[in-house]
Each structure stands twice: as structure tokens, then as C-alpha cells.
Image (cartoon, rainbow, N blue to C red):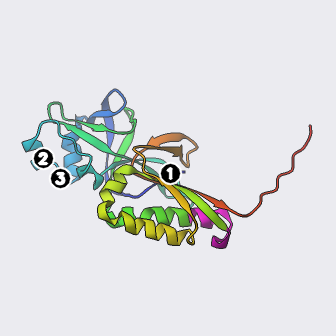
Amino acid sequence: QLFTGYNATGKKGLVTQMEGTRKICTIDNRPAIEVYNEWTGGHYTELMKTSDNPNILAESSLYPLGQVCGQDEDGEPFYRSIHPSQIWTTTGAVQVFSDVKEGETIVMMSGTKENVVNRIAGVASHIVRTSGFSLQEVRGSLVIFCAGAMMFAGDSIGIAAQKLNTALGGTPYMGMHTFGEQGMFPDGLSRHGNLMFSALVVSSRRRIMKVLNV
């Protein structure tokens, strides 16, 4: 299962026109960048004045988009985060790194560097806690830490590694920084997301299964 490091805001809209699967042309029948820029409080205004069709991977790490993909254990909305990659100033479209469909609702997400730095340790702790085994039984882990989130964390990536080490009780782990993450969501569907985290935690507990000959 994938986890985002961002929180949903109250700003959302309906995707009303797409070009292909990853270029959002309009939101609520208005140019997508016009709506998205308003949601951010004008975060891209100056950039659009000085550059045609600019790459916004770094800038949008503060304000990714999101989509509800089920509910968590507490019945709260569970979000897939979507990373905007480019503004098409010539058409008003916003390019993203995950598939979106016309008629779907998207929201603006927000986060801080601290959120991102703390997230992978939080995910590992959550996996251990919900798996039913103790920290003393952990033998190792394979973790996924989005490369876009890693770049956003910058020089603080070492702090994230230290926090993960503590969350896993000092056991060995292997990690990958990926551009795009695939996994199951609470609604039962497998999807492609961005700026997301995951962990596979291995324990020493044996699981005994009975095999029946039928």
C-alpha cells in the first residue's frame, strides 16, 4: 500500500477536459492553470510571466494535486498524490505525472519539508504496528521513498534515514527513490501515484498455513 506525505486542503474541482491521460486542460470549465494557481494563492504567477511552458516539478512539490482512493482505518479519505510537472502557458493546461480522467474530482494537497522527512519512518512504524508483530521481531525492510519527495527533502534526507533506522529498531533496510510509485489503495484498485511512500517489513515470526488436499 502507498502513503502520501501531504494533506488535502479544502480546494477542489472537477476535471472537465483532458488531452490524453496526463494533461489537464480545464477544471470546472476554466483553464486548469488558472484554477490551480488560484488554489496556491498565486504561487506560479511570476513564473508564468518570465517563462513559456515552464517545468514546475520543484515548485509543485509544495502543492501537489490529490485524489480520494478509498478510506483509511478510521474512515477518513485516503489520497493518492499527483505531481504536476509542467504548465502550458500557451493553452492553460497542467501536465501531471499520473493518469487523470474527465469527470474525476481532484484536490490541492499541501505539505512541508518536515512532513516529507518524517513520513517514511511513520509509514514503517504503521506497518509494524498493524502487522501484529513487535519491533524486536523485525529483521529488515524494503522501503520506497519517491525521488521527487527526496529532492524536496534536500539536505534533510539524512534525517529521514535516521528516523527510519529508529522506527525499524536499527535493523537493516534497503531503499529506492522512484519517479512514480505503483500499489494497492484502500478501494481495492492498483494505481500509479507520485510523491508517495511504502514499506515492506520482514519479521522473524513464522506463519504456519495448512494446505488441504482436495
Q: Residues within 10 Å of mark 1 (few under 14, many from 20)?
A: many
Side of 210 relative to 66 (left or right): right
Q: In the rendered image, which residue does mark 3 sit on?
A: 43
> How much space separates mark 2 and mark 3, taking CA atoms?
8 Å
Q: In this view, does 25 lie above or below 12?
A: above
Judged by its main secondary structure, the magenta piece is helix
**The residue tagged with tag 1: helix, strand or loop?**
loop
Q: Where in the figure is residue 11, as x and y percent of width and height?
A: 30, 52
Q: Please name the residue shown 55% across and 67% down the image.
A: 125
Magenta residues? Answer: 126-137
Q: In the rendered image, which residue does mark 1 sit on?
A: 2
Q: Residue furthest top?
A: 20
Q: Please name the residue shown 24% across and 39% down the image.
A: 86
Q: Please name the residue shown 27% across and 46% down the image.
A: 57
Which is more foreground, mark 1 or mark 3?
1
> How much space separates mark 1 and mark 2, taking CA atoms?
32 Å
Q: Are marks 1 and 3 in contact (CB under 8 Å)?
A: no
**The residue tagged with tag 2: helix, strand or loop?**
helix
- Amino acid at dot 1: Leu
Name the image quarter holding residue 171: bottom right
**N-terminal-most mark, 1 or 3:** 1
Q: In the rendered image, which residue does mark 2 sit on?
A: 47
**Is residue 143 in the magenta section?**
no
Side of 95 relative to 131 (left or right): left
Q: Where in the figure is residue 185, as x and y percent of width and height?
A: 53, 47
